Amino acid sequence: MFNAPDASPAGRVSTASLDSLQREILDLKRSLNAVILAHNYQVPEIQDVADYVGDSLGLARHAARTSADVIVFCGVHFMAETAKILNPGRTVLLPDKDAGCSLEESCPGPKLKALQDSNPKFWTIAYINCSAEVKALADCICTSGNAVKIVNAAPKDRDILFVPDENLGGWVMEQTGRPMTLWKGDCYVHVEWTHAAIMRIRQRHPDAPVVAHPECPKAVRMLADEVCSTEKMVTWCRATASKDIIIATEAGMLHRLKKECPDKNFIPAPTERCACNECRFMKMNTLEKVRDCMLHRTPEIQLPEDISRRARVSIERMLEISGRD
Ligand code: 13P
Ligand code: SF4
């Protein structure tokens, strides 16, 4: 059960150096006129120094309206790219340039283009977990927080091609009743949860509802009381009367949930083969790397103008359909 003091930074940095690192980062933030945006899966000490912590949708919305000169993006590469696409004139820094995503890797632009060319009626919806090149090929972007709305708004006379997450796509088909062609990609973290593992934890905590991310396989989603984006998990857990809640998503989420709902007990759903509910890409960012990227203004996200311009159209379309706030 996760009710220990936050997944502590112990073993990474001592409390004294943690304090001084965080102070250094806040000083750099002021001198650079920077904003620090962090995804819910970032390590606790990064979440605690960020100006905003949220899901991909909230982060994109914040990036779209920032007036800061520098965006320090504590998340993975595709998220920082999205911030750059929305802010071509601003500096976007990613603490570790190798922080990728298995979904992004599963869908190379040229392979998507070949599939699109096979059916002129395709209307491509790309989950935001993809490269800028794929975003440039898409008609509209979605996140786990607005995918149902985006699919419902798609032109009725077109065939939807949904890339790259087949689990999110399958869930959206169930919610909307709209058939879609699904790309065969998945999140290597969320596919580790199985029906049997969730059944076992449910037996140990029969009164605890299960909250799962839509990147989980169908066999897991069907056991969940709520399937939603990481940000909606916060709202759902706040509102439920249940004190114990089983969470099937990446471990970083537990820090955010514990902070937002201090009166609840969050039980990380065990995976089948291992305790591998950490995204190795999300965990590449550390507080030292946050400080260093601000000190040296690198790694910086750079994108070809043509790709950036076309990707912006599909991201802006998403923001128009799902709302900017
Ligand atoms: P959210 O947009 O729900 O935060 O999900 C992002 C993600 O990468 C999930 O693995
Ligand atoms: Fe990508 Fe999965 Fe990591 Fe999310 S948790 S960034 S989908 S690999």
Image: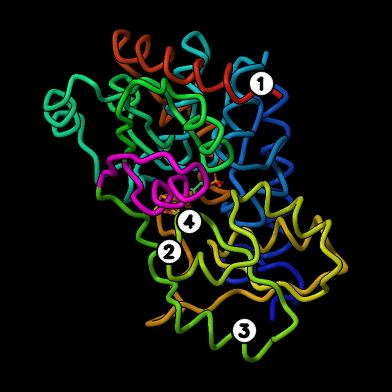
Which numbered circle lies on residue 218? 2
> CB of residue at label 4: within 8 Å of ligand 2?
no
Asked if labels 1 and 2 touch by Cβ distance under 8 angstroms, the answer is no
Q: Residue furthest bottom?
A: 204
Determine the residue positioned at 32% across, 23% down. Answer: 158
Determine the residue positioned at 48% across, 56% down. Answer: 283
In three-dimensional space, the C-alpha distance between marks 4 and 1, rounded to whole angstroms, equals 29 Å
The three-letter amino acid code for the residue at tag 1 is Arg
Percent of width and height locating residue 163: 32, 38
The three-letter amino acid code for the residue at tag 4 is Lys
Which residues are drawn in magenta?
164-183
Magenta run includes residue 168: yes
The residue mark sitting in front, 4 or 1, is 1
> CB of residue at label 1: within 8 Å of ligand 1?
no
Residue pointed to by mark 3 = 202
Q: Quadrant of residue 246?
A: bottom right
In three-dimensional space, the C-alpha distance between marks 1 and 3, rounded to whole angstroms, equals 37 Å
Instruction: Give neighbour class at mark 1: few <14, some 14-19, many 20+ (Cα, 10 Å).
Output: some
The three-letter amino acid code for the residue at tag 2 is Lys
Whichever of callouts 3 and 4 sits on the residue coming sooner in the sequence is 3
The residue mark sitting in front, 1 or 3, is 3
Q: Quadrant of residue 203?
A: bottom right
In three-dimensional space, the C-alpha distance between marks 2 and 4, rounded to whole angstroms, equals 26 Å
Residue pointed to by mark 4 = 283
Percent of width and height locating residue 299: 41, 31
Which numbered circle lies on residue 324? 1
In three-dimensional space, the C-alpha distance between marks 3 and 4, rounded to whole angstroms, equals 28 Å
